[in-house]
Amino acid sequence: MKQVVVLIGAGQIGMAISRRIGVGKNILLADQNEENANAAAKVLANAGYETTVATVDVSSRKEVHALAQQAASLGELTGLIHAAGVSPSQASPATILKVDLYGTALVLEEFGSVISTGGSGVVIASQSGHRLPPLSPDQNKALATTPAEDLLSLPFLQPDKLTGSLNAYQLAKRGNSLRVMAEALRWGKRGARLNTISPGIVMTPLANDELSGPRGESYRKMIVDSVAGRAATPDEVGNVAALLMGPDGGFITGSDFLMDGGVTAAYWFGDLEQPAS
C-alpha cells in the first residue's frame, strides 16, 4: 500500500520538510488557496515527487475531516506536516486564534483518528510561544485538553483579555505545543508520534511580512542580537523535522523543539526586548 504524507500549508517550511520525508510517497498537499497548492505541487512534481492537491480551511471541521478522510483513502497515512497559519502582521487577534489555535486543534483531532501505526506528525509552532509569561496550571491544561469546539470560549482568550495580535499569536503558539503534548497520548494509542517545532525567524514570505511590517525594526533587532546573528532557512527546519518524523526520532513524542538561534535566550537572560504588541 502506498504511503501518504499530508502537508497542510504550502509554504516554504512545509515544502522543505516534504522534500526530506516525502521521497517515494504520495504527498497530499493542502492549502486554503488552490493556486498556492497547485504551484507548490508543480515544484515538487518537477523534482520527482508524487503529489495530490487539495484545498482546506483549517478552521472548518467539515473541511479538515474531509481532508483526513481523503488522506486515509489514498493509502497508509504515515506523516502529517501541519504548517498552516497566520502571523501577527497578517491578521486580527480573533483570526489568529481561530486559525492558529482552533485550526490546529481540529487538525490534530481529525488526523489523530486516521494516522497509521508507526506514523508521525509535526506541527510548526513558533519561538513566540516561548516568550509568553508563564500561564497558570489550569490555563495550561485548558489549552491542552479543552475540546476544540470550546477552545475559543476560554475566558483568558476573550478580546478584553488580549493586548493585541502578538499576544494572541503567543497564546496560540503556546497552545499548539501544549496541545501536541496532550494529543501525543491519543496518537500513541495508535502507535504514532507527534511533536512541535518552534522556529525563530525563518526566511519565508511570512517572515518578510513581519520584517516589513509595524514590528519590523524589532524583528531585525532579534536577528542581530541573537546568538546566531542570522535568520534560519526553511531547510534547517526540515532537518529537525526529518529527525522527529524518522526512525532516529522514535523515542521522541509530545515534545517541543525550540530552534531560534538563541533569540529566546537573549530575551529572557540578555538585553533583547519584546516586540511591541
Image (cartoon, rainbow, N blue to C red):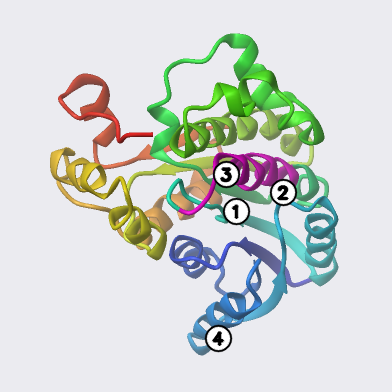
Q: Look at the numbered disc 1 and give the secondary structure of its residue.
A: strand
Residue 253 visible in the snapshot = no
Left or right placement of residue 201 versus residue 33 in this view: left
Give the percent coordinates (x, y) of residue 212: 29, 58
Q: What residue type is labelled 4?
A: Lys
Indicate whether 77 appears above or below 113: below
Q: Which amino acid does label 2 sit on?
A: Val
**Closer to the eye: label 3 or 1:** 3
Local packing at callout 4 (Cα closer than 10 Å; few below 14, some 14-19, many 20+) is: some
Residue in the image at 37% along x and 63% along y: 204
Indicate whether 252 appears above or below 112: above
First along the sequence among labels 2 and 3: 3
Q: Mark 4 points at which residue?
A: 42
Q: Give the range drawn in magenta.
A: 90-108
Indicate whether 47 appears above or below 218: below
Q: Look at the numbered disc 3 and give the secondary structure of its residue.
A: helix
Q: Which amino acid does label 3 sit on?
A: Ile
